Amino acid sequence: MDPACQVGTVQVHGVSIMVWCVFSWQFLVSLVLVPTSLNVIQYVEFLGNHLHPFMLYCHPHGNGVYQQDNCTSHRSRLATAWLDEHSSNFSVMNWPPRSPDLNPIENL
Protein backbone atom coordinates (compact mmCIF):
# COMPACT_ATOMS: atom_id res chain seq x y z
CA MET A 1 0.00 0.00 0.00
CA ASP A 2 1.23 3.49 -0.83
CA PRO A 3 2.45 5.21 2.40
CA ALA A 4 0.90 8.48 1.16
CA CYS A 5 -2.53 6.85 1.55
CA GLN A 6 -1.92 5.75 5.12
CA VAL A 7 -2.85 7.72 8.20
CA GLY A 8 -1.64 7.03 11.71
CA THR A 9 -4.12 6.30 14.47
CA VAL A 10 -4.52 7.83 17.88
CA GLN A 11 -5.56 5.59 20.73
CA VAL A 12 -7.79 7.21 23.34
CA HIS A 13 -8.37 4.94 26.29
CA GLY A 14 -11.86 4.73 27.73
CA VAL A 15 -13.57 6.60 24.88
CA SER A 16 -15.50 5.00 22.08
CA ILE A 17 -17.91 6.10 19.42
CA MET A 18 -20.18 4.16 17.13
CA VAL A 19 -21.24 5.38 13.71
CA TRP A 20 -23.60 4.19 11.02
CA CYS A 21 -22.28 4.43 7.51
CA VAL A 22 -23.20 3.40 4.01
CA PHE A 23 -21.07 1.76 1.34
CA SER A 24 -22.37 2.81 -2.06
CA TRP A 25 -21.04 3.23 -5.58
CA GLN A 26 -23.60 5.94 -6.30
CA PHE A 27 -24.20 8.03 -3.18
CA LEU A 28 -22.15 9.89 -0.63
CA VAL A 29 -23.75 9.70 2.79
CA SER A 30 -22.81 11.38 6.05
CA LEU A 31 -21.83 9.33 9.07
CA VAL A 32 -24.50 9.15 11.74
CA LEU A 33 -23.39 9.03 15.37
CA VAL A 34 -25.11 6.21 17.21
CA PRO A 35 -25.32 5.83 21.00
CA THR A 36 -22.85 3.15 22.10
CA SER A 37 -25.49 1.56 24.34
CA LEU A 38 -28.15 1.12 21.66
CA ASN A 39 -31.23 -0.71 22.92
CA VAL A 40 -34.01 -2.25 20.83
CA ILE A 41 -36.28 0.82 20.94
CA GLN A 42 -33.44 3.15 19.91
CA TYR A 43 -32.44 0.77 17.11
CA VAL A 44 -35.95 0.67 15.65
CA GLU A 45 -36.16 4.48 15.91
CA PHE A 46 -32.82 4.66 14.12
CA LEU A 47 -34.13 2.41 11.35
CA GLY A 48 -37.14 4.67 10.88
CA ASN A 49 -35.21 7.95 11.09
CA HIS A 50 -32.13 7.07 9.05
CA LEU A 51 -32.26 3.77 7.19
CA HIS A 52 -35.78 3.97 5.78
CA PRO A 53 -35.49 7.49 4.27
CA PHE A 54 -32.08 6.58 2.84
CA MET A 55 -33.38 3.43 1.19
CA LEU A 56 -36.41 5.23 -0.23
CA TYR A 57 -34.15 7.92 -1.71
CA CYS A 58 -31.41 5.67 -3.08
CA HIS A 59 -33.50 2.65 -4.05
CA PRO A 60 -37.01 3.90 -4.86
CA HIS A 61 -37.88 0.59 -6.59
CA GLY A 62 -37.23 -1.47 -3.47
CA ASN A 63 -34.06 -3.17 -4.70
CA GLY A 64 -31.77 -2.03 -1.87
CA VAL A 65 -30.11 -4.50 0.49
CA TYR A 66 -29.44 -3.75 4.15
CA GLN A 67 -26.69 -5.61 5.97
CA GLN A 68 -26.65 -5.67 9.73
CA ASP A 69 -24.71 -7.69 12.24
CA ASN A 70 -26.31 -10.19 14.55
CA CYS A 71 -26.24 -8.30 17.83
CA THR A 72 -29.16 -8.83 20.18
CA SER A 73 -31.02 -5.60 19.42
CA HIS A 74 -30.81 -6.25 15.67
CA ARG A 75 -32.29 -9.73 16.01
CA SER A 76 -35.04 -8.78 18.45
CA ARG A 77 -38.70 -9.46 17.68
CA LEU A 78 -39.44 -5.74 17.51
CA ALA A 79 -36.62 -5.00 15.03
CA THR A 80 -37.41 -8.08 12.95
CA ALA A 81 -41.09 -7.09 12.82
CA TRP A 82 -40.14 -3.55 11.71
CA LEU A 83 -37.86 -4.89 8.99
CA ASP A 84 -40.54 -7.35 7.83
CA GLU A 85 -43.09 -4.52 7.70
CA HIS A 86 -40.77 -2.54 5.39
CA SER A 87 -39.59 -5.50 3.29
CA SER A 88 -41.22 -4.04 0.17
CA ASN A 89 -38.80 -1.09 0.37
CA PHE A 90 -35.56 -3.09 0.79
CA SER A 91 -34.34 -6.54 1.74
CA VAL A 92 -32.16 -7.59 4.65
CA MET A 93 -29.11 -9.70 3.91
CA ASN A 94 -29.10 -12.95 5.86
CA TRP A 95 -25.70 -13.99 7.08
CA PRO A 96 -24.41 -16.22 9.85
CA PRO A 97 -23.41 -14.88 13.26
CA ARG A 98 -19.77 -14.15 14.06
CA SER A 99 -18.78 -13.74 10.41
CA PRO A 100 -16.18 -10.95 10.31
CA ASP A 101 -15.33 -11.80 6.69
CA LEU A 102 -18.75 -10.52 5.63
CA ASN A 103 -18.47 -7.31 7.63
CA PRO A 104 -16.84 -4.69 5.36
CA ILE A 105 -15.99 -2.30 8.20
CA GLU A 106 -13.86 -4.98 9.89
CA ASN A 107 -11.69 -5.11 6.79
CA LEU A 108 -10.90 -1.37 6.65
Image (spheres, grey):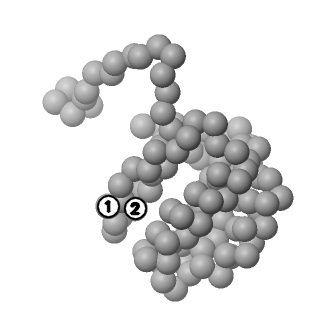
Q: Label 1 sits on what residue type?
A: Leu
- Residue that appears at 43% across and 74% down: 58
For the residue pair 96 and 49, the one nearer the viewer reads as 49
Vertical position of residue 105 compared to residue 17: above or below: below
- Residue that appears at 56% across and 81% down: 62
Instruction: Give the position of the N terminus as an image quadrant.
Output: top left
For the residue pair 104 and 53, the one nearer the viewer reads as 53
Label 1: few (<14), some (14–19) or many (≥20) C-alpha neighbours in 10 Å: few
Residue underneath mark 2: 24
- Residue that appears at 35% across and 55% down: 30
Vertical position of residue 98 compared to residue 13: above or below: below
Q: Residue 9 location in percent, x, y?
A: 33, 21
The answer to whether marks 2 and 1 mark residues whose Cβ atoms lie closer than 8 Å is yes
Query: Residue 28 got which mark?
Result: 1
For the residue pair 43 and 2, the one nearer the viewer reads as 43
Q: Real-space Cα distance between discs 2 and 1?
A: 7 Å
Query: Can residue 2 be seen by looking at this rendering?
Result: no
Q: Label 2 sits on what residue type?
A: Ser
Q: Residue furthest bottom?
A: 61
Q: Residue 27 location in percent, x, y?
A: 34, 66
